[in-house]
Image (cartoon, rainbow, N blue to C red):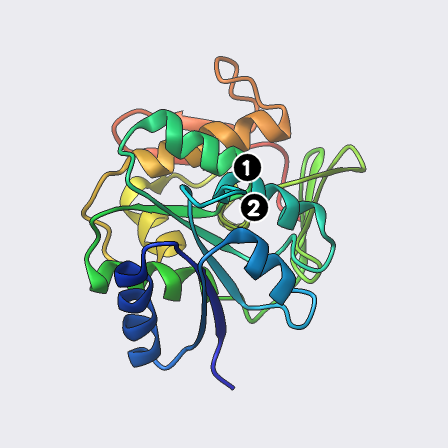
Amino acid sequence: MPNLIYVTEDDENIRELIKMVLTNSSYNVAVYESAEEVLQACEEKIPDLFIFDIMLPAMNGIDAVKLLRKNSKTKAVPVLMLTAKDTEFDKVVGLDAGADDYITKPFGVMELSARARALLRRNVVLEKITCGAISVNEATREVYKNNRIVELTFKEFELLQLLMKNNDRVLTREELLNAIWGYDYTGETRTLDAHIKSLRQKIGDDAEKQEYIKTVRSVGYRFCEGELL
């Protein structure tokens, strides 16, 4: 069965363009003009992916995503944010609200399709991974540190999962971007840095001490706490 995507965008032209692109990629697509409409739709059926514009009438996309992350039925559904703002602050605010990825307008249709495809990927083999005080349950997509749950976005979970599976091995920036974003990423690479920064904050990894996620200058990152169990 094709994946279901909910698109929330108040600009009719952009909304219909996104619908056409994703429908041509064999997805089922439902479009909405407001956050209130898509939240109402979730009471009937939960999609496999949300695409939200940040600037919406009444409730904005950021506040809508925060509500989705508080709902047990939608908290694990990936979110792609659309924004006309090309500043690091706006992107970080979106990620902190619970978005998993973002794309800046104007965007290419191939890039949009690729980002949606990447967010819809799921690992087939599920297990529990433990490195030091941090454990990841792939089946439930839950992360714990010292037996206390850590709330992560979809992309943050994927990133931590990949780093822990490759415990003590350096993963290059290119490897991480291609594995997590699912395509040969040639655009702005600060998206990786923003996710690493947010992930470190959530797992309590001091940016200076780097107890868990080590920065390998000019190369990439590695996770190096404890042994992979």
Query: Is 4 rendered above or below residue 143?
Result: below
From mark 2 to mark 1, how far is it between C-alphas? 6 Å
Taking the spot 34% from the left edge, 58% from the top edge, the residue there is 115
Amino acid type, residue under disc 2 in the picture: Val
Residue 119: give x, y in percent of width and height.
Answer: 44, 60
Name the secondary structure under disc 2. Answer: helix
Query: Is 36 rendered above or below residue 190?
Result: below
Q: Is residue 122 left or right of residue 15?
A: right
Q: Nearer the viewer, residue 84 or 159?
A: 84
Residue 151: give x, y in percent of width and height.
Answer: 67, 40
Circle 2/circle 1 CB separation < 8 Å? yes
Residue denoted by label 2: 65
Taking the spot 48% from the left edge, 37% from the top edge, the residue there is 95
Q: Is residue 64 left or right of residue 128?
A: left
Residue 97 circle label:
1
Q: Earlier in the sequence, mark 2 or mark 1?
A: 2
